[in-house]
Amino acid sequence: MTELFENLEPKKKERILNAALEEFAENGYKRASTNKIVRQAGIGKGMLFYYFQNKQELYHYLLQYAMDIIMEEYFQRIDLSETDFVERLKQAAQVKMQCFSRHPHIFNFMGTFLLASEEQLPENLQTRFETLQREGNARIYDNIDRTLFRDDIDVEKAYHLIQWAIEGYQNHLKNKLKGEKMTSIDMSYYWDEFYEYLDVLKKTFYE
Amino acid sequence: MTELFENLEPKKKERILNAALEEFAENGYKRASTNKIVRQAGIGKGMLFYYFQNKQELYHYLLQYAMDIIMEEYFQRIDLSETDFVERLKQAAQVKMQCFSRHPHIFNFMGTFLLASEEQLPENLQTRFETLQREGNARIYDNIDRTLFRDDIDVEKAYHLIQWAIEGYQNHLKNKLKGEKMTSIDMSYYWDEFYEYLDVLKKTFYE
DNA sequence: TACTCATTCGACCATACTGGTCAATATAAA
DNA sequence: TTTATATTGACCAGTATGGTCGAATGAGTA
């Protein structure tokens, strides 16, 4: 069925993808409205069900699509040769930001999916998802130089605390910038602030 | 209108409160269903609109109620004489947990309210809400002994990093225990683990 | 031109649920 | 018995749902 969709003009395809990702991101699977999606995408109702058999097939397609992007444009680009944990996370944050600016709805979509886990996935998607999680973990923890840490603390705990702190900053920023147009914001200020926080983390957790 | 509700048998009152808090917590204001609330509370549809003029009045009542509880059973019980920042947050976490076990839906309800901010509040609730926020901040940051921190880092940044890290642990725990019945969990293990994380924070951020 | 076949649309469908009403009761008090 | 209060759920008009389908359009071809 979906070959029809694949062969669409890229612009139209993207409009539909974005509309659908956004709607599912905001409302989860069950509550997302196909009516809103077609309205937002600027196509007739019939087309959506011409490309996809039903709402569920569309959703599964989006999941596959989102996982592919996160794998290829985020996880795979995290530099495993960087052995400094904080630097690794710094680089990961940069790559994530690039990925986000190219695909603004992907992360919200995945976030809603993770939070809700509303419906059982078919097996291929389920295993794909588990692979994704494993790869994500590996890209953060593999090949880290543990000797950088002060030796009076548990390194595993340090990993977690640093990660939580960084996620905290990112959430804090997301809240602060909520509502503002991303294009009109000077990000360099926030990157600098972010780096300052990272320096504090290094100073405190490294010896 | 609400005096009728206030004078209800406590058990019935509580059933209605819990049903409503849960429904609004899960769905936000607009999507919450009064039908589900009455079904869950085990009362007839008519009664809800006998106690409250309409959905909105019910919602505002719940907001007031939730804010009162958070103020009196959470914020006010945070010990301002504890000047050690980490210890302050530790004690706050304990008090929060007590409050949570007495009122399991309050925090989810407030969380959804904060996240969505769907509708404009009447002035009295709005100012009440701002007071609550101010008090919450004060209870965390007032009368902290800043000299405990190592002097090669910015104390304000340390505040934030520590707070984010602790929130991170709490979220991590919430996810981990999601689905499990709270009553069947041995919390003492997780408290110990939590304290270990706090010790790491002290070791790293204090001098 | 005439015929074919892939696209595209949106009115339409049965179904479900919404917040809120109200006439009918049950219960209790006087 | 009368009066006042509590309680119910069938009912209302309105909205939204996922999905269908006949008709129209357009492109390519013979």
Image: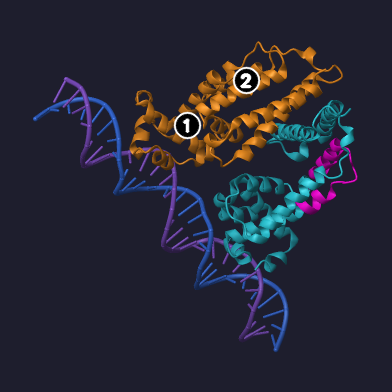
Chain colours: A cyan, B orange, C purple, D blue
Q: Residue type at mark 2: give it.
A: Gly
Query: For mark 2, what is the residue?
Result: B136
Q: Is residue B122 above or below residue A108?
A: above
Q: What residue do we see at 43% from left, 42% from top?
A: B36
Same chain? Circles 1 and 2: yes
Residue A64: % across, % down: 70, 57
Q: Regarding mark 2 in the picture, which secondary structure is present there?
A: helix
Q: Is residue B174 above or below residue B68?
A: below
Q: Residue type at mark 1: give it.
A: Tyr
Residue B34: % across, % down: 43, 39
Query: For mark 1, what is the residue?
Result: B59
The chain letter under disc 2 is: B
If you read the primary sequence from the N terminus, does the residue marked by circle 1 or circle 2 appear first? 1
Q: Which residues are magenta?
A: A70-99
- Decide which of A181, A187 is in the foreground and name it: A187
The chain letter under disc 1 is: B
